[in-house]
């Protein structure tokens, strides 16, 4: 079984079983090992410091002071949803503690949890924006509890992040204090909102409670949490009928149809992807085929019509939303970092439901490009928005008043190794490639797999197996090895390539093919010391998009393996990346390069330098372009 974002735990859930990040450890000098070290030593302490500096933690203190003495009230600071940033960073602490025990960090986290517990009202309600000044709550919260929950009070959004955070901390430490806080708030919500005549009949304004309540159900076994999450989804269309004459608002809230009838992605991207993830969880647990049919169609709509080459989603700043088919402007692209992270969550769930590599193809694209671009190589500045073109006005920021992206990254990066492997029966899926050591539960035993590779810079992977007996190994052959960089038909390579791959076991090359699910199957009786060598050619290639995407008509982009590249003004002095023309048949070479003290593989074509998209904007503000003008295709 798999618990979303938490790894292997206590109950059957998906057809495939995720392997917990605690069972897979990146090498310290690997691509993601270096990123995790930066997250642990820089990003996490930095974010904890900003929670204090911006009074996000202080608001919990004030709420606790009011609970102890109701004569004390405090003026509002910040945003009404700031509580969620504290929960997300604490979730990142939990993931870090599981792999890197740290008594001082755990003690600090315990002190924060004590502050949060004191901010909770006696019946379990927990929202500092109301509790610290209940007579004059934050105006976005409303004069009464739940008054604006089907809009954007974020009371239930914060419940979801509280549950995710508390479950992760329980698994990390075995301590129940934080879990008790989450359960008490969830009980308060279940008591107030539901199908019964005496309750409020509302759905979530910003989806997230659906994910968190499922996790709480899995750790407690209390069915009411699962039922509440399912209720929020099933009542969504009905609870937004006050907007029935405003089709734009209904689409923005994913309430234009009952969720089971939706077949296209519309509206606020993060809200939507959290909703689809919750639907996948509940479909897996309950067997609801109507949920599965809906998210299958929505997934196809996204990857065939509404997604950027980087894996970014959301084309408009004002609405942060999925818009009409093929509406994918480059300079105005929103592509929120949180949307990419939510896209990873959704695609992993889709893989666990269907066991097909195309979902991992998208997950990988999002990890390396749209999500990773959201954090600097140094780990302490961030992008909220990730455009594919810049005239020089974009720069990474140390923090945001709405800090969902930095806090989301602080929990996302420490848990990334959970996406490496999965199991199904007597079968191990090898989904991602990274130098690492894994201990994979399979039946009553554990199988050790050691990976050695310089991926994503190189396509050679060596796997050493430490296990005995008959089982299947399924190696993912990335979709970028085929005639398109991504599934869905939206993007394709400009020119054919003779790039190929091979698989050898103990030095003997196998005569095999990729199956329909995108994997190479190796079925044998294994013994300790067996090796598998996967070689994948990794040429740089040019990519075009369907003509329906007006913004990129007669434009091309450069990719290599899972990485998207861009031309940056800093590397091409005297050249304006926004006006460069490039031949789609141009020779493209690789070159060792350094950005902000980190080694990367750059590309060189027609006397221009291209760097990985995630590495741009590290050398001051300047122009940048992903899709370059070309001759008519």
Image (tube, rainbow, N blue to C red):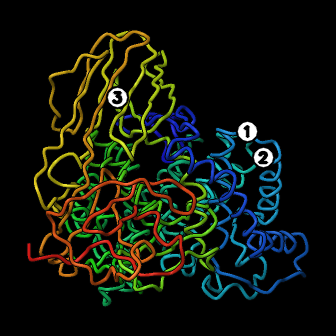
* Disc 1/disc 2 C-alpha distance (Å): 8 Å
Residue 427 or 291: which is nearer the viewer?
Answer: 427
Q: Residues within 10 Å of mark 2 (few under 14, many from 20)?
A: some
Q: Which mark is residue 106?
A: 2
Q: Position of residue 484 (x, y in %)?
A: 18, 54
Mark 2 or 3, which is nearer the eye? 2
Give whichever of discs 3 and 1 has the lower sequence position.
Answer: 1
Relative to residue 568, is residue 374 drawn left or right? right
Q: Which mark, residue 424?
A: 3
Residue 90, relative to residue 501: is it above or below?
below
> Which residue is depicted at the point 87% across and 72% down?
65
Say which element carries label 3.
strand
Rounded to the nearest whole Å, what is the CA distance between mark 3 and mark 1?
A: 30 Å
Asked where in the image residue 12 lies, by quadrant, the reply is top left
Nearest the viewer among 501 and 221 is 501
Q: Nearer the viewer, mark 1 or mark 2?
A: 1
């Amino acid at each position: 079984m798999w618990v979303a974002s938490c790894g292997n735990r206590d109950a059957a859930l998906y057809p495939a079983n995720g392997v917990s990040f605690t069972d897979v450890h990146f090498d310290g000098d690997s691509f993601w090992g270096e990123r995790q070290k930066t997250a642990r030593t820089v990003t996490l302490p930095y974010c904890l410091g900003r929670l204090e500096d911006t009074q996000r933690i202080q608001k919990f203190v004030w709420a606790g002071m009011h609970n102890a003495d109701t004569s004390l009230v405090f003026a509002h600071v910040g945003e009404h949803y700031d509580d969620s940033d504290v929960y997300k960073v604490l979730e990142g602490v939990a993931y870090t503690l599981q792999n890197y025990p740290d008594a001082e960090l755990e003690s600090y986290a315990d002190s924060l949890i004590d502050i949060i517990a004191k901010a909770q009202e006696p019946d379990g309600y927990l929202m500092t924006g109301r509790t610290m000044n209940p007579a004059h709550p934050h105006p976005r919260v409303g004069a009464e509890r739940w008054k604006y929950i089907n809009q954007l009070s974020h009371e239930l959004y914060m419940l979801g992040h509280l549950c995710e955070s508390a479950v992760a901390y329980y698994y990390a430490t075995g301590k129940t204090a934080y879990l008790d806080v989450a359960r008490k708030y969830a009980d308060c919500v279940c008591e107030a909102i539901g199908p019964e005549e005496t309750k409020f009949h509302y759905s979530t304004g910003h989806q997230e409670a659906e994910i968190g309540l499922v996790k709480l159900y899995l750790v407690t076994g209390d069915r009411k949490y699962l039922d509440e999450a399912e209720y929020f989804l099933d009542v969504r269309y009905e609870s937004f009928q006050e907007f029935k004459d405003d089709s734009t608002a209904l689409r923005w809230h994913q309430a234009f149809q009952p969720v089971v009838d939706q077949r296209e992605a519309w509206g606020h991207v993060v809200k939507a992807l959290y909703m689809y993830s919750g639907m996948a969880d509940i479909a897996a647990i309950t067997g609801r085929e109507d949920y599965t049919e809906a998210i299958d169609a929505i997934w196809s709509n996204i990857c065939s019509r509404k997604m950027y080459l980087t894996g970014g989603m959301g084309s408009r700043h004002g609405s942060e939303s999925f818009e009409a088919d093929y509406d994918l402007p480059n300079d105005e692209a929103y592509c929120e970092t949180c949307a990419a992270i939510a896209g990873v969550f959704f695609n992993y769930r889709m893989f666990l439901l269907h066991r097909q590599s195309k979902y991992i193809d998208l997950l990988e694209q999002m990890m390396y490009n749209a999500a990773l671009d959201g954090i600097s190589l140094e780990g302490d500045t961030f992008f909220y928005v990730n455009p594919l073109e810049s005239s020089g006005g974009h720069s990474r920021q140390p923090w945001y008043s709405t800090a969902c992206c930095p806090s989301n990254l602080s929990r996302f990066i420490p848990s990334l190794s959970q996406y490496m492997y999965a199991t199904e029966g007597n079968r191990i899926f090898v989904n991602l490639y990274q130098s690492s050591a894994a201990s994979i539960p399979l039946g009553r035993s554990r199988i050790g797999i050691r990976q050695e590779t310089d991926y994503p810079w190189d396509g050679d992977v060596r796997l050493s197996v430490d296990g005995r007996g008959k089982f299947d190994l399924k190696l993912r052959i990335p979709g970028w090895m085929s005639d398109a960089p991504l599934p869905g038909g939206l993007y394709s390579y400009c020119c054919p390539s003779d790039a190929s791959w091979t698989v050898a076991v103990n030095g003997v090359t196998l005569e095999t093919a990729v199956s329909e699910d995108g994997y190479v199957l190796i079925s044998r009786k294994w013994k300790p010391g067996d090796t598998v060598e996967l070689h994948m050619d990794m040429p740089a290639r040019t990519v075009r998009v369907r003509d329906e995407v007006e913004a990129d008509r007669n434009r091309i982009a450069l990719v290599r393996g899972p990485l998207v590249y861009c031309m940056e003004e800093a590397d091409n002095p005297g050249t304006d990346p926004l006006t460069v023309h490039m031949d789609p048949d141009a020779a493209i070479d690789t070159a060792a390069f350094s950005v902000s003290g980190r080694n990367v593989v750059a590309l060189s074509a027609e006397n221009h330098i291209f760097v990985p998209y995630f590495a741009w904007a590290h050398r001051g503000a300047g122009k940048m372009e992903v899709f370059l003008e070309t001759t008519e295709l």
